[in-house]
Image (cartoon, coloured by chain):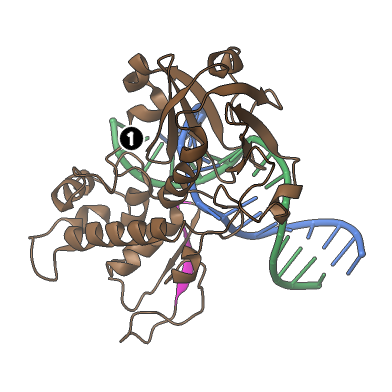
Chain colours: A brown, B green, C blue
Amino acid sequence: MPELPEVETVRRGLQPAMEGATIVRAETRRKDLRFPFQTDFVARLEGQTVTGLGRRAKYLLADLASGDVLLMHLGMSGSFRVIDAAGATAPGDCHHPRNEDRAHDHVSFTMSSGASVIFNDPRRFGYMKVIARTVLNDEPLLKGLGPEPLGNEFDAAMLARACRDKKTSLKAALLDQRVVAGLGNIYVCEALFRAHLSPRRLAATLASKTGGPADRAGRLVEAIHDVLNQAIKAGGSSLRDHRQTTGELGYFQHSFRVYDREGEKCRTPTCRGTVKRFTQNGRSTFWCPVCQK
DNA sequence: AGGTCGTCCTGTAGGC
DNA sequence: TGCCTACAGGACGACC
């Protein structure tokens, strides 16, 4: 499910319920998600105040007063919902269909406010881990991550440099979290379309003289910025699983130009092409062969 | 060493 | 209706 815009949407939804509040009770309803829970997982959470809720790439990071950090990844199908002290998931919405399916509620946090934060993940590719902040920089899960696509260090020169010696496709390079951290299949397809670049293009060909229509890296960085910012504004994309923490859907899927649009007309105004789909590194790529070069 | 592929897991959609 | 297959927003680890 979740790429950077969805994770950021979740972070903003969890923030009012968690930041400044204390976890009075933490429950795991099975022994593992993607990995077994640490044996001291619950003990290191209960009684801890959440001093801040951040995000790195597709990871959520809850800072605890103890000096630990709770690292959370949503995998493919993870979602959080917040239930307030009165038992409602959102003002006026306590009967969302999603809330009736509790079979995959795997973790719950009861906060000092009386609110509950519940993690649901049918496929269980998600995971949580408590790490001491002092060794966060050595954490293998975070160590190899590339720059944040919306951060200052991510620019055309940096992206071109990261792709320069790659022998793989531009699509695969952008999905590689070591190159840039936070993009997934949807937003890579959408960004390549918006930059008019072919997903098949060799990553190394991204570099070119800056300025003018051949500034491929510049166009791509701008396209990535635009699509991520617009998606965050829309609360992410809801295809199947993604919900905001209130249970509401994101609505960026209505703005897709290629993803999930196989056989439909290209949305570039002057283009008469049709959106095609093919498999690249085991994942579906959607693109317009007429206007993406 | 970088790149590719299979794999983890459940749910759903589509074909017959 | 029911059974089967294919596929899904991620990313690790084994393999070449």
Nearest to the observer: residue C6 or residue A288: A288
SS at mark 1? Answer: loop
Res B8 → quadrant: top right
Identity of the residue drawn at 71% across and 26% down? A30
Type of secondary structure dominating the magenta stretch: strand
Residue hosting label 1: A145
Q: With respect to residue A80, does A239 lie above or below? A: below
Residue lying at 51% horizontally and 23% vertically, measured from the top left:
A129
- Residue at left offset 21%, top offset 49%: A159
- Quadrant position of the C terminus of chain A in the picture: bottom left
> Which residue is pictured at 33% across the width and 57% down the height?
A229
Number of numbered labels in the structure image: 1
Above-or-below relation of A189 to A30: below
Q: Position of residue A162 (x, y in %)?
A: 21, 44
Q: Nearer the viewer, residue A104 or C6?
A: A104
From where the camera sits, is residue A96 visible? yes
What are the residue bounds of the magenta stretch?
A275-281
- Confirm whether the magenta stretch covers residue A21: no
Q: Is residue A154 above or below residue A30?
A: below
Residue A82: percent from the left, percent from the top? Answer: 60, 41
Q: Amino acid at mark 1?
A: Leu
